[in-house]
């Protein structure tokens, strides 16, 4: 399976072997790696068309983020080796686009991103519980399984016991079976309170205060831009940088936040406000950012670029699909 992004960008530290309390994870909202930035940038304008982009245009766009030419070309090369991009060469000129697998993964990820903040209390009160056992010497496989679970919204309640409020669909069962390659058992169960100090609420598997802090940091950082965007003051390269950077931060929330019903979360849970800020910036900058990306690419190809198309959050929610070619 192609993973356009690295789980370590969301959870930089190695997963602990034993979770004895709220997970102690050092989260960050700083700039992503050049590879992560490149994927976000390319996906924002080509995920539904898989348009070819000249390498020179990709390098130029990344340069507007402060990425050096050498680092940009290295990122393109590594993304190609990872199966995220595929290349085409005509003479001395190279172009790249998202692979079919990467575009599908990014489209699915876009649906999850767009769902953040679209709160619903339609939860049946059941937890999906994944229990697994692997020999200690199988550390690589243990980490791979944990990475798979983390990407799919699970958290460790105890070592070898991971939970999610969401049902496990048939496709998810097949993916879990392929990732586990060991003894694994899955339940869909209800938490029974023991009315005792020893009882641990499943919600405690997530660092709820830490998640709230991430949302609050996002709101504080990005909301001051909304009046300027509404006034049409953010244009050109600045529009592209802002739109890409806000997505690069916000895309982490589907992995960080279990999306539990608001009724289970602390009062004034900031998820919905964070969504409002994100939509205001991402959708508000669609046209000026799209125009700039097209201009940069046209400056390399000397041709119009109708296949470069930005999308709104609503388009992501409905599932951005690649046009037939």
Image (cartoon, rainbow, N blue to C red):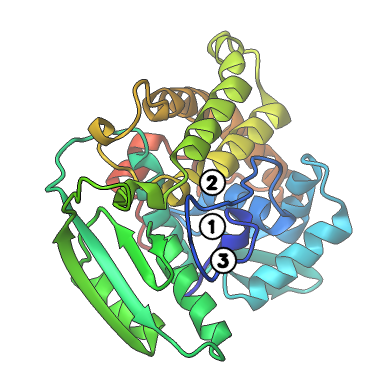
- Examine the rendering and report whether any part of residue 58 can be seen: yes
* Whether residue 98 is situated above or below residue 111 in the rendered picture: below
Mark 2: give few (<14), some (14-19) or many (20+) Cα within 10 Å: many
* SS at mark 2 in the image: helix
Q: Quadrant of the C terminus?
A: bottom left
Say if mark 2 contacts mark 1, CB within 8 Å.
yes
**Front: mark 3 or 2:** 3
Image coords of residue 303 (percent x, y): 65, 48
Mark 3: give few (<14), some (14-19) or many (20+) Cα within 10 Å: few
* Whether residue 245 is situated above or below residue 9 in the rendered picture: above
Image coords of residue 230 (percent x, y): 53, 11
Give me the C-alpha separation between circle 1 and circle 3.
41 Å
**Left or right: where 29 falls relative to 169:** right
Residue bearing mark 3: 16
**Left or right: where 316 falls relative to 211:** left
Residue bearing mark 1: 51
Image coords of residue 310 (percent x, y): 49, 40
Say if mark 3 contacts mark 2, CB within 8 Å.
no
Identify the image quadrant of residue 244.
Answer: top right
Image coords of residue 300 (percent x, y): 75, 50
Decide which of 27, 249 is in the foreground and name it.
27
Q: Earlier in the sequence, mark 3 or mark 2?
A: 3
- Examine the rendering and report whether any part of residue 104 can be seen: no
Q: What residue appears at the point 61 percent right and 11 percent down from the top-left corner?
A: 228
Identify the image quadrant of residue 173.
Answer: bottom left
Q: What residue appears at the point 19 percent right and 49 percent down from the top-left corner?
A: 193
* Whether residue 197 is situated above or below residue 157 in the rendered picture: above
**Front: mark 1 or 3:** 3
Number of labelled discs? 3
Give me the C-alpha separation between circle 3 and circle 2.
37 Å
Residue bearing mark 2: 45
């Amino acid at each position: 399976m192609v993973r356009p992004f690295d789980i370590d960008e969301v959870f930089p530290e190695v997963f602990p072997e034993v979770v004895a309390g709220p997970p102690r994870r050092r989260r960050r909202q700083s700039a992503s790696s050049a590879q992560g930035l490149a994927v976000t940038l390319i996906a924002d304008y080509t995920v539904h068309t898989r348009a070819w982009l000249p390498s020179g245009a990709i390098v130029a766009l990344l340069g507007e983020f402060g990425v050096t030419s050498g680092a940009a070309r290295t990122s393109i090369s590594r993304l190609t080796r990872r199966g995220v991009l595929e290349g085409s060469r005509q003479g001395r000129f190279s172009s790249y686009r998202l692979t079919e697998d990467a575009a599908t993964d990014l489209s699915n990820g876009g649906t999850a991103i767009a769902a953040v903040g679209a709160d619903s209390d339609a939860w049946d009160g059941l937890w999906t519980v994944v229990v697994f056992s692997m020999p200690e010497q199988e550390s690589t496989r243990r980490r791979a399984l944990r990475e798979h679970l983390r990407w799919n919204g699970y958290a460790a309640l105890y070592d070898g016991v991971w939970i999610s409020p969401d049902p496990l669909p048939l496709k998810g069962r097949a993916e879990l079976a392929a990732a586990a390659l060991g003894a694994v058992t899955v339940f869909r169960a209800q938490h029974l309170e023991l009315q005792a100090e020893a009882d641990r609420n499943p919600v405690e598997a997530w660092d709820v205060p830490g998640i709230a802090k991430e949302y609050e940091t996002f709101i504080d950082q990005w909301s001051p831009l909304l009046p300027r965007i509404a006034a049409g003051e953010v244009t050109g390269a600045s529009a592209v940088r802002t739109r890409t950077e806000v997505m690069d931060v916000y895309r982490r929330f589907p992995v960080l936040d279990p999306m539990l019903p608001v009724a289970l979360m602390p009062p004034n849970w900031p998820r919905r406000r964070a969504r409002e800020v994100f939509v205001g910036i991402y959708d508000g900058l669609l046209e000026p950012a799209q125009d700039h990306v097209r201009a940069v690419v046209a400056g390399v190809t000397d041709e119009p670029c109708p296949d470069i198309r930005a999308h709104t959050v609503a388009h992501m929610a409905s599932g951005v699909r690649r046009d037939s070619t």
